[in-house]
Each structure stands twice: as structure tokens, then as C-alpha cells.
Amino acid sequence: MKNTQLYISENKERFVNELIDLLKIPSISADKAYAKEVVKTAEQVSQSLKNAGADAVEICETAGYPIVYAHKLIDPKLPTVLVYGHYDVQPADPIELWTNPPFEPIIKKTEIHPEGAIFARGACDDKGQMFMHVKAFEAMMSSNELPCNVKFMIEGEEEVGSENLGLFVKNNKEKLSADVILVSDTGMLANDVPSITTGLRGLSYVEVEVTGPNRDLHSGLYGGCVANPINILNKMIASLHDEKNQITIPNFYDDVVELTKEERAEMAKAPFSIEAYCKALDIESVYGEESYSTMERGSIRPTLDVNGIWGGYTGEGAKTVIASKAYAKISMRLVPNQDPHRITELFKNHFESIAPKGTRVKVTPHHGGEPAVTPIDSIGYKAASKAYEQAFGKKPIPVRSGGSIPIVAMFEKELGLKTVLMGFGLDSDAIHSPNEHYGLFNYYKGIETIPYFYHHFTEMSK
Amino acid sequence: MKNTQLYISENKERFVNELIDLLKIPSISADKAYAKEVVKTAEQVSQSLKNAGADAVEICETAGYPIVYAHKLIDPKLPTVLVYGHYDVQPADPIELWTNPPFEPIIKKTEIHPEGAIFARGACDDKGQMFMHVKAFEAMMSSNELPCNVKFMIEGEEEVGSENLGLFVKNNKEKLSADVILVSDTGMLANDVPSITTGLRGLSYVEVEVTGPNRDLHSGLYGGCVANPINILNKMIASLHDEKNQITIPNFYDDVVELTKEERAEMAKAPFSIEAYCKALDIESVYGEESYSTMERGSIRPTLDVNGIWGGYTGEGAKTVIASKAYAKISMRLVPNQDPHRITELFKNHFESIAPKGTRVKVTPHHGGEPAVTPIDSIGYKAASKAYEQAFGKKPIPVRSGGSIPIVAMFEKELGLKTVLMGFGLDSDAIHSPNEHYGLFNYYKGIETIPYFYHHFTEMSK
């Protein structure tokens, strides 16, 4: 891969400029006002794959935004890498908190990124990380060093739940057949602490509505006499955790895979400063389930969080009203082997059962996702580990992440393939938030690491 | 009072039409857009007092909306009745739930009011009830049967907390000197069950803010690791009631005057159908403090209700966010002898003390009001009781109400006078709600009852 790495080092500046061009298109999939821009982004991605040397570049229509497909098949006897990524981005709200416009990329130095970072919506999630794969592929092609077959599947609906990807995968199993899936849509611990995500939490998300009296009431005349839906909702939600901060929904933990002492000891080796963590969030102390560390609480343990709550009078000043209804959005992060459908059902049954007389409860499920764990003894993981070691000069740490990428479980189910999560982002990159950015170091290191993975994966598959 | 009653029966139709004219002016004190209309209403009220035969009619300026003053002093040796009322009204929101425009009064028959009711904002609260006093005064004047002195004090800021009334009263003690204060701004049990309000609850109203991390966080990455301000707020609020639905704030009940067995037995005699109550609110069951009846819970017991709550994502669909802040508006209804300032202080100290590490809590007091109890052995109460008996053919029941009229305690403090709460509204009149109305029966009965009160109060004061 010498020539490939040489090509990369010689084209670094152009690689950044091409990414900047891609970041200028506001491909916000959640907002229909940007529909044309989303499609335009798909076209630009497909063009970049063509330019890099891919064959069969195709913009595959779906019921929503298109999926860009491309491949380079050099020998059916060689292994095939399937690269997944997404070209859509999160909305930029709250726009007023951006120090530079979200779709006018700018390179600025930060404490964590002394060599500069690109600030723009999608810089890290996922245009920047997805584009590393296009550029790494281009480098291998240009250097005549592509060691195996490669397929690309780049979607435009990841930020709105990948609603049409499942059907596409189901209908194109042959086309997508491969030996491993490679995704760069996660992070690593720090620029000097490379890590590979080996687990993702699943998700169950519900909306609840508590109804008391049939209309808003005067709290003087009715206060104390009827179940106040907000008080009741508060009480019901509070009861979902016990004094150890464990979740009280019956059978909730039934399918949770507990880690062994050895596995937890291994996890605890990852560098983590509780002081720095609290300082960054301006909190006096962390908070969570008894007997687990903060890293464990955020990765190997399921959680229940209220994501939104509303009811009654929320304007200026005081209004003495008892609301007829109160609402909340509640999400549960799940770990292997919790099934999101079963958990949603358990939540619904339990929540309905604890509603006191005088109230009615409605539970509406939103989207969910299954947890996933990547084995660290697979060829894919081992190849990735070697690739990181080669690029960073350090063996990467396997880390289980708290977030959810529901497609990982879907890929395994539909294609029978394990995914390697080769993410190069940092927690501080502010993905989904104002001032999202991606370090130039991380972008380059990603482009350098990927060809090593191709090499090792091909070698180890022999 | 024969001629007075004759005059009333002969002028019923005109009395309704004059009220309708008054109801057409949208005197919404909470909304500055209606400032001119509020002032115009004051002028119309003062004109109606002049027409009725009052002397010294005056529109007294305050820092806010004016107070209409008038009197008729016939003999310094005779007792003086001070009538209080208000000419401002609540906002009409939500306007779309009104079946007729709120400021285009219309008379419609209802199940409870087979002889018709006037539908308009302010019909009952308080234009209709206040205007009964003007018309009763007119009837006594026209019939030459006014038996004592009378003073009127009609304000325009009751719905926004009577902010300038206190200073006015303080500065005009001589002018307002009287023997009893008469207020019609409450209700009675039913048209065939006359009652007189003898107690009002006080009020302590606070807004709370719980802050967790310094910014909104991704619930996948941080869920389970930090105190989620919404979950914490829910837990803190839930902990404010114990399993008996008593309030857990230390020393909260210290000053509560417990009623004797006899007093409670007397209260229990008031007709009350729990079935009809639940049916009207479309609830399966009532809910409240153990060992107390619904009527007791709503009148002689203090309560704590959340009036509004908000935080996190409240839009369409799902967003996996941990909010940085969560908010609630919480009010406590107080009973004698709870002091609203002390209760607010107790709440604040307690609420701050239960905030877990990793969160910060801010408690901001809104307006409050003191509870009040009217003695039933006073001349005022006895005269009112006789008046009701004469007008309704039934002795009225003394009832303690759950609402708050903070000015009652203020009048007692500043003027040393007890108030008689001669209210003729019904709970079903939908005051503060869409489709507020006031029964014609109640309006006429009020006008008939008031002169009897003047008569008995004068006789009994001899």
C-alpha cells in the first residue's frame, strides 16, 4: 500500500476541497424544503465514485431519497467489502448558535484539533466519514493497489430512520453480497487513543399521553379533588426507576446479556477522566445505575430517559389550571439481547397498568432499533485492528458505544453479514448540534487507515 | 322592600339588556391591546352608578386600570355597606372553542338553565354579578327603600392580581370606611341549593427550573450517565406527595386549622353527588388525600398541583435528546392559617434540598394570596342568610370554597372589615373557560336577594 499512501499524502489538499464542496449542499433529509438539494448530493456522490474509478455507478430510486450504488469487482475469488454510508445530514437548528453558517464550511483550529477542523453540518456525520471511503478507494485505484472487490451503498435517509433502506437491501441481496460491511459513522476515544466500536445500543421510543378530566379545570375549585394528569405523569415516570436507578418495568432486564468480570475489567482499561467529563458538561457529579461505572452505564446497560415533556400552562406568569392532558416522549436504549418490540410492549403494558383510577393512558410507539454487538474475533475486526495499529502506531481499544445504528442489526439479518464500525469521529465533534466539525487529522487518518483494512482483510481471508 | 321587588320584576328585561351592553366591551385586563376597552368599561360602570342614583361617582386613577368609586350616604347613624366587584374579564382564549363570539352576548337555554343563560366572557365573572349590585341599588333608590348607606368600589385589575388595589385601599381608609363588605364573585351549590361561601383558600405559586448538563445531549451517548433534568424534575415532583396523597414538604401542615368532627359533619350535609361529579368530568373516579371527602379535599385541605410542565423535544416524531433544562409551574392552595410567604419559603428550601448532585434548581415565586374564613356568627353572615332564605325560600348552606380571592384577607387587614361572599354563580358556568355563561335565574335572584340583605343588615345592626 506504499503507492496508495503516497498518493494520499500528495492529494490531501484536494481531498479536503472536494469534501468542502460536498458539505456546501444542504442535504437535510428531515425537511422537504431541501428535497432538491438532497437529490443533488446523491448525484455529486455518484459522480465522485465514477471519478474514483467505480463501475456500475447507479442512483437507485426508492420511495424516499435515492441510494447511491457502485462497485469495482476485480476478481470473484477475492473477498468483497461492502461500504455503507449516508449523504444526508441533520437539520441545522438552532441556526443562531452556529458561529459560521452551517453550509459554508470553514477550517478553524481548536484545542483538540490544533491542525484544524472543518466546521459544517455533516462534516463528521456522515459526509466527512463517508467521503473518506471514496477517497481511499480512489487512492487504491490510482495506485493500482486495490486488493479485493468493493461495493458502495450510500443512502440519503439515515437521519430520518433509514425507512426505505430495509426494502432495498431485501430486494437486492445478490447485488449486495459481500464478505464484510464497513461503516464509518461512529467515533473513537481520542486522537491518540484509537478505538473501534464493537457494540451499539438498541432503541425503543414511545410517546405517552395521560388524560384526566375532560377539560382544563380551575385549580382552586378542583385542586385536590381529581387526578391532575401532570402530577400523575410525573409520578408514573418517577416510578420507572427504583432507588438503585434500575428500571422497574417487569421483565425489562430478562434478556440483558451481563458482561463477565473479565470483559468489564477489559472495558475499564479505556482511558476515561470523570473530572474532565463533568467539567465538559458543567455538572458536579455523574448520575446513574448503582454498581456500574459511567462508561458501563453509557454502553453495556439499558437506560430510560424522558426526551420531552409538556402539559398545562407554559406561558409567562401564573395560570391556575389543572390540564386535561399531559404528554411525554420516552426512549429506552437497549443492549444485547433486548428486543425493541418486546421492550415497547413491556413498557406499554406496565405504563398502562400503573395509571391510577381517574386517568386514562395512551402509549404510542415511535421507531425503534435493535442493539448489535460486533465480535472481536472475526476477520473483519482483526483486520480493522491491524489497520488502525499501522496508521496510528497503537493498537485500538474495542469500545461499546451508547448510540444506536439500527441498520447494523438489519444488515446482519438480511445479508448475514457482520459490520465493522471503523469510526474516526470524536465525542466533541458536536454531531447533531450547532458547530459540528471534523478534524483534518481524523479525515486524513481515516483515508490512510481504510486501505490498510482492505489489505489485511484480503490477506486474512486467504 | 315590596316596592323594590316590584320595581325589579317590572324592569327585568331592561336589566338584562343593560348587562348585555356591558358584556359587549372586551375589558381584558391581561392584554394591553384592550387597554382602551378596559377604560371604556370603567366609564360605562360609573355612568350606570350615576343613573342609579349614586353620588360622588368617581373614576379613580391608579398605576394600572382605574377603580370606580361611588356612594349614597343617607344618614351617618345608619350602617354602611361597601360593595366590591370588578369590571375586567379573563382573556377569551382558546377562542375557537366558543360556540358564539365571546363579546357578542347571546341568550341560550341549557339543561341547568331552562329559562336561559347569557353566554359571554364576563357574564358571571364578574360583570354579571357586579352589575346585580348596581341594579339592586337602582331598585332601592327608585322605590325610596334604601335602608342604609352604601359605597361602591369596582376595580379593573382583578384578573391580573389586583396589583393596585392594595395601595388604593391603604390610601383611602376614611373614604372606604364601612360596616361590612359585600362581594358577589363566588358561586353557590345549585339553583335549588343556595349556599354562601364562608372560606377561601390561599395560594402560593412558584416556577421551578432544573438544570443538568450545560447543553442538550445525545441520549444515546449520554443516556444513563448523567442526571436527565426531566426525569429528575418528575422524580422531585412525585416525591412531593406520599402514598396517602399528603404533601411531604416538612412543616407544610404546621399551621393548618383542622376542622372539628362537628364542623365536618355539618359540611357533609351539603348535597353532593360523586356520580354526577365524575360524569361531568368524564372520569372513572376522584383522586385525593386519604381520609377526606371530595368536598373537603377541595376546600378545607391544602393541595399541591402542577399547572404546567415543559422541557426537551415536544415536536412531531422522535428526537433522542437529553435536555439541559426542565421547567414546571406549581401552585399550592392554602387553608387557614397557612401563610403564603412561609409556604413558598418551605417549598423553596425543600425543593432545593431534594435536588440530586449533578443538577441545579431554581425556584421563582409568582403571586400568592392568603386564605380567608368568614365567621358565620357575624351580623353580615346572618343578614345574608336571612336574605337568601327570603329570596329562595330555603336557608343557605355555609360552604368553604377551594378558590382564592386574596383581596378578602387584604380588606380585613387594611380596613378591619369582614367580607360577606354573596355569590350566585354555579360551578358549571365555565368562568375562565370558553362559553362562560350566567343563568337569568341567577342574575334575577341576585338582584332580588341583595335588597333583602340591606334590610336585614340594617335591622340587625340596630
Image (cartoon, coloured by chain):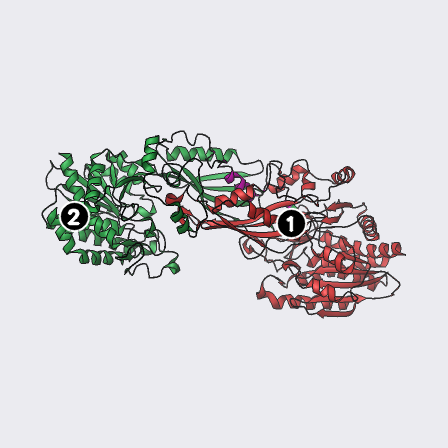
Chain colours: A green, B red
Q: Is residue A226 magenta?
A: yes
Task: From the image, tell me which residue sits under label 1.
Answer: B343
Q: In the rendered structure, find residue A137 and report the number of the disc placed on it.
A: 2
Residue A293: percent from the left, percent from the top? 40, 38
Between B229 and B292, the residue placed more toward the observer is B229
Mark 2 residue crowding within 10 angstroms, few (<14) / some (14–19) / many (20+): many
Left or right of B119? Residue A72 is: left
Residue B394: percent from the left, percent from the top? 80, 45
Residue B91: quadrant of the picture: bottom right
Image quarter where the C terminus of chain A lies is top left
Q: Is residue B11 magenta?
A: no
Residue B103: percent from the left, percent from the top? 61, 60
- Image: magenta residue range: A222-248
Q: Chain of mark 2?
A: A
* Image point (79%, 53%), residue name: B449
Mark 1 residue crowding within 10 angstroms, few (<14) / some (14–19) / many (20+): many
